[in-house]
Image (cartoon, rainbow, N blue to C red):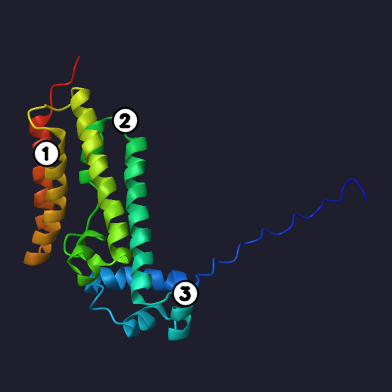
């Protein structure tokens, strides 16, 4: 091979698009339909139509609609818990973590992605109850730990105990969803969350020099 001969570069290879499995399609469809219409109001036919997955494939992946709901709730719970973990690791101030939690983007009229399922009659079944309890237990601990840390670090007053403050914050978020859906006004959730932010503002102590 002569010195002037250049080796041609191999063409760049484009990775083929990831193939979405029938199971993933069903979970995505169910997440949307259950959130919009509710679990009990969504029929198997709705799921087949929306996902493009047939009945045979549905029962290949899930034993039934309740099994699919469990998969949906486990996925949502894991995603939401991961978000809180990211706030804990990326935000240094406990008080700022509480403000960041309250500032997470939410859809008031659709309702909480997990909280809305507590109104379903199937809540008593472990497939539904366990992931919901896992999520809310984590949120309660996240709030309580950060309120306690903020008080210990002198960021907020101890005039109210940490448990009371954390419960007020969680209640403002979940209650705000209910009010927003009841009145059909998404901004009702914003007003409710603003009340929790004002609570923190009132409890905040001057920063130490």
Helix, strand or loop status at disc 3: helix
Q: Name the N-terminal-most of marks 1 and 2.
A: 2
Q: Nearer the viewer, mark 1 or mark 2?
A: 1
Could you say where residue 80 lies in the image, as x and y percent from the top left? 32, 52
The local crowd at label 1, few if under 14, some if 14 to 19, many if 20 or more residues have their Cα within 10 Å, is few
- From this view, report whether residue 184 is shown above or below residue 52: above
117 to the left or right of 55 = left
Measured from the top left, where is residue 13 in percent x and y? 66, 60
Tell me which numbered mark, 1 or 3, is placed earlier along the sequence.
3
| Image height of 20 relative to 96, above or below | below
Residue 92: image tag? 2
Does label 2 or label 3 sit earlier along the sequence?
A: 3
x, y percent for residue 10: 74, 57
Residue 100 appears anywhere in the view:
no
**Residue 162, picture quadrant:** top left
Secondary structure of the residue carrying tag 1 is: helix
Q: Position of residue 122 (x, y in %)?
A: 24, 70
Q: Quadrant of residue 46?
A: bottom left
Q: Residues within 10 Å of mark 2 (few under 14, many from 20)?
A: few
Residue 127 at least partly seen: yes
> Which residue is painted at 15% across and 54% down in the image?
174
Residue at mark 1: 164
Viewer-closest of 199 and 65: 65
Name the residue located 32 percent from the left edge and 58 percent from the top edge.
131
Give the side of residue 21 with respect to residue 198, left or right: right
Q: Is residue 145 above or below residue 27?
A: above
> Is the C-beta separation of discs 1 and 3 under 8 Å?
no
Q: Which residue is mark 3?
A: 61
Count of numbered circles in the view:
3
Q: CA distance from mark 2 to mark 3?
A: 42 Å
Tell me the CA gap for discs 1 and 3.
43 Å
């Amino acid at each position: 091979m002569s010195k002037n001969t250049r080796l041609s570069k191999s063409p760049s290879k484009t990775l083929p698009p990831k193939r979405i499995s029938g199971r993933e399609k069903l979970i995505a469809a169910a997440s949307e339909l259950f959130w919009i219409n509710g679990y009990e109001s969504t029929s198997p036919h709705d799921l087949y139509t929306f996902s493009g997955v047939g009945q045979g494939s549905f029962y290949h992946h899930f034993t039934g609609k309740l099994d699919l709901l469990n998969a949906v709730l486990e996925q949502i719970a894991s995603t939401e818990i991961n978000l809180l973990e990211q706030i804990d690791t990326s935000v240094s101030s406990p008080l700022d973590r509480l403000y960041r939690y309250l500032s997470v983007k939410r859809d008031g009229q659709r309702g909480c992605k997990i909280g809305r399922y507590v109104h379903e009659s199937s809540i008593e079944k472990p497939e539904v109850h366990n992931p919901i309890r896992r999520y809310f237990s984590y949120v309660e601990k996240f709030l309580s730990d950060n309120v306690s840390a903020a008080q210990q670090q002198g960021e907020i007053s101890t005039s109210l105990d940490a448990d009371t403050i954390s419960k007020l914050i969680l209640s403002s978020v979940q209650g705000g969803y209910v009010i927003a859906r009841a009145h059909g006004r998404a901004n009702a959730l914003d007003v409710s969350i603003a009340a929790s932010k004002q609570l923190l503002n009132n409890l905040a102590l001057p920063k130490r020099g």
